[in-house]
């Protein structure tokens, strides 16, 4: 372990079952547990339920609760959110078990988030026996549905309810292939109780993961690449919109190399993870949440736009050009494979001269090769991007979101942080993003309450795969209050994590909407906090952390005190602890963020 790695005190004795040397493979769920292990799922997060009691027993008593290890959660939404956060770091699925129809109902918001965020995720459910004559009275009737998958079918990529052990094994392998094939999204498999608890009298031979080749991702054709190279040769103001791309460091380096070769300006999106260094000279404006100000101005000047799976190209076009003429726009994305009528998460249909159903990062690699001999533009178009302000010591003044960002940057400067989550009003211009794991993006679906679970799942992946990284989640107080029970899971399983609650004592985004409506109707703007303000009594957020075994600090209200709290918190996380800091900030957003959100609320 290097000096900058976190000292992990992994509680290996948590939930270690008593070994039974006489256990044999004789139940349907034993065979399915072996298949689940073969899927390379290291963990399954769950809130327990009788509907999957057979599989639960097999995971514990047949597999020994290792590979996968079950992680107990206090709510199904946390279980799925944990798997979501894990996938954002690793790019691989984690499992989540939800109990029957009622557990699936609890999990739906988290599944929708993962759908919108395009991450791989395997959700497992269960139901009472298919044969109604064999159901237990009452409970198996109210917890059984004719078509359980219908609850989530519009925001999962595939679902199944297999009626036999071989069919269930095939469904598991198919589900992994589907969830891992871009565009990635959750899958759901519902195991009937009678399949799990079937006695297997004759040994079964089931397939393995090696029997199923993964599909090959699509790439642009040679003539399409040639056509784009021709457009680039004529462009003097090329712009790249870096959207949903991989966290692979080699892909990161190729994206930087392509921008530098083309002398293209770059914009990035706070809704997705780190895609390009925001302190690079070619990063034209600070990361955008909504196109306004400098970002829209840069886009308006461009004479060629390449979108690498940008979330909302149509919205960007509208912000820059309205209904006017646009320059050539090339959109590289396979996302339309998921577009359907129930949800509008696909956004508007953009006007494009080329639309390639291709992997963005493979396209970048091919484009680099195609342009290797192209002459480099002699000058960079547009004004140089304004650099980030110099590091400055925290001040003894009341905290704003801007001060919090500055203070966090100052105290994290000697660490390798991974910002797992950031609140809606984050001051992106005060905190540079410099590598693929520096920032993981938002929850995808814009819900409230997923943040703590996602933070724990991401911290778990960092603990196992990137122990040099300091996991930091900056959560809104509303988000924290809805999902704070996930902190208990982090403490129980020794998952180091620093949570900073950006506590403005309000559901502040909705205050902006109420302010806008009041101004339009010439009514008292001062009433905007009614029904929004989380105060009277104030909630002791640090105590909530302490109640679950974490170290709680706060409330802190000034920059100097926050700096001391962060120093203490960072030291404790390095020792393997979970820390919750209640940072009380003044209500309000920075002007750029506030103006963009006010435009959205019109």
Image: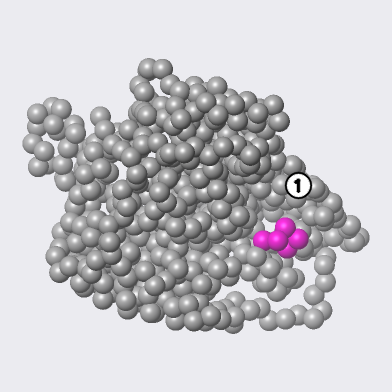
Residue 421, how many percent across, how many down?
41, 56
Decide if residue 557 is on the left or right side of residue 345. Answer: left
Residue 431, how many percent across, how many down?
34, 57
Question: Could you tell me which residue is drawn at 15 percent across and 63 percent down?
Answer: 398
Q: Secondary structure at mark 1?
A: loop
Question: Could you tell me which residue is drawn at 32 percent across and 76 percent down?
Answer: 567
Q: Residues within 10 Å of mark 1 (few under 14, many from 20)?
A: some
User: Which quarter of the picture shows residue 331?
Assistant: top right
User: Which quarter of the picture shows residue 10?
Assistant: bottom right
Question: Could you tell me which residue is drawn at 16 percent across and 46 percent down?
Answer: 529
Magenta region: 37-41
Q: Is residue 452 above or below residue 488?
A: above
Residue 184, how many percent across, how many down?
61, 44
Q: How many marks?
A: 1
Decide if residue 197 is on the left or right side of residue 260. Answer: right
Image quadrant in which the C terminus is located: top left
Judging by the rendered image, the residue that carries numbered circle 1 is 214
Decide if residue 554 is on the left or right side of residue 332. Answer: left
Q: Is residue 385 magenta?
A: no
Question: Could you tell me which residue is drawn at 68 percent across and 68 percent down?
Answer: 67
From the image, give the main secondary structure of the stretch colored magenta.
Answer: loop
Q: Is residue 475 above or below residue 549?
A: above
How are the residues colored? one colour
Residue 81, how many percent across, how many down?
49, 55
Q: Is residue 1 visible?
A: yes
Image quadrant in which the N terminus is located: bottom right
**Residue at far right of view:** 202
Q: Is residue 445 visible?
A: no
């Amino acid at each position: 372990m290097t000096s900058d790695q976190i000292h992990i005190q992994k509680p290996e004795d948590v939930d270690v079952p008593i070994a039974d040397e006489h256990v044999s493979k004789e139940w349907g769920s034993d065979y399915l547990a072996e298949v689940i292990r073969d899927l390379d799922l290291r963990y399954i997060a769950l809130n327990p339920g009788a509907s999957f009691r057979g599989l639960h027993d097999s995971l514990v008593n047949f597999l020994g609760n290792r590979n996968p290890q079950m992680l107990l959660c206090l709510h199904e939404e946390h279980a799925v959110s944990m798997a979501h956060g894990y996938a954002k770091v690793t790019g691989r699925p984690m499992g989540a078990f939800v109990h029957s129809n009622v557990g699936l109902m609890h999990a739906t918001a988290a599944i929708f988030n993962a759908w919108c965020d395009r991450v791989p995720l395997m959700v497992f459910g269960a139901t009472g026996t298919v044969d109604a004559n064999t159901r237990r009275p009452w409970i198996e009737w109210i917890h059984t549905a004719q078509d359980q998958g219908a609850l989530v079918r519009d925001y999962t990529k595939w679902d199944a309810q297999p009626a036999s052990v071989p069919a269930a094994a095939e469904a598991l392998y198919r589900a992994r292939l589907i969830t891992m094939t871009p565009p990635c999204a959750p899958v759901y498999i519902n195991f009937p109780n009678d399949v799990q608890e079937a006695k297997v009298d004759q040994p079964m031979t089931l397939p393995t993961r090696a029997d199923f080749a993964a599909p090959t991702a699509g790439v642009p054709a040679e003539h399409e690449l040639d056509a784009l190279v021709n457009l680039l040769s004529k462009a003097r103001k090329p712009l790249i919109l870096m959207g949903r791309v991989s966290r692979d460091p080699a892909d990161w380096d190729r994206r930087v190399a392509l921008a530098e070769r083309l002398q293209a300006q770059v914009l990035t999106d706070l809704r997705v993870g780190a895609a390009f260094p925001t302190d690079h000279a070619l990063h034209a404006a600070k990361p955008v949440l909504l196109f306004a100000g400098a970002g829209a101005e840069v886009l308006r000047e461009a004479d060629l736009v390449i979108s690498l799976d940008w979330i909302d190209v149509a919205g960007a076009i509208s912000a820059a050009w309205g209904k006017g003429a646009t320059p050539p726009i090339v959109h590289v994305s396979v996302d339309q494979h998921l577009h359907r009528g129930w949800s509008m998460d696909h956004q508007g249909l953009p006007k494009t001269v080329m639309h390639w159903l291709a992997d963005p990062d493979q396209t970048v690699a091919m484009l680099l090769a195609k342009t290797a001999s192209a002459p480099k533009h002699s000058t960079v178009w547009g004004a140089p991007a304004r650099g980030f302000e110099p590091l400055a010591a925290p001040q003894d003044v009341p905290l704003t979101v801007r001060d919090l960002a500055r203070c966090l940057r100052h105290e994290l400067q000697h660490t390798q942080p991974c910002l797992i989550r950031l609140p809606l009003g984050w001051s992106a211009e005060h905190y540079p993003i410099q590598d693929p794991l520096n920032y993981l993006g938002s929850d995808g679906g814009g819900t409230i309450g997923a943040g703590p679970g996602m933070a724990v799942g991401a911290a778990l992946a960092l603990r196992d795969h990137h122990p040099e990284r300091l996991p930091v989640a900056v959560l809104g107080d509303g988000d924290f209050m809805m999902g704070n029970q996930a902190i208990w899971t982090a403490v129980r399983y020794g998952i180091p994590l620093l949570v900073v609650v950006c506590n403005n004592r309000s559901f502040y985004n909705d205050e902006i909407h109420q302010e806008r409506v009041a101004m339009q109707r010439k009514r008292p703007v001062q009433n905007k906090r009614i029904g929004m303000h989380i105060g009277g009594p104030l909630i002791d957020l640090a105590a909530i952390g302490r109640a679950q075994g974490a170290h709680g600090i706060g409330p802190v209200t000034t920059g100097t005190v926050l700096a001391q709290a962060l120093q203490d918190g960072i030291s404790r996380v390095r020792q393997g602890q979970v820390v919750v800091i209640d940072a009380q900030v003044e209500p309000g957003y920075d002007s750029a963020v506030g103006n963009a959100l006010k435009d959205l609320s019109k």
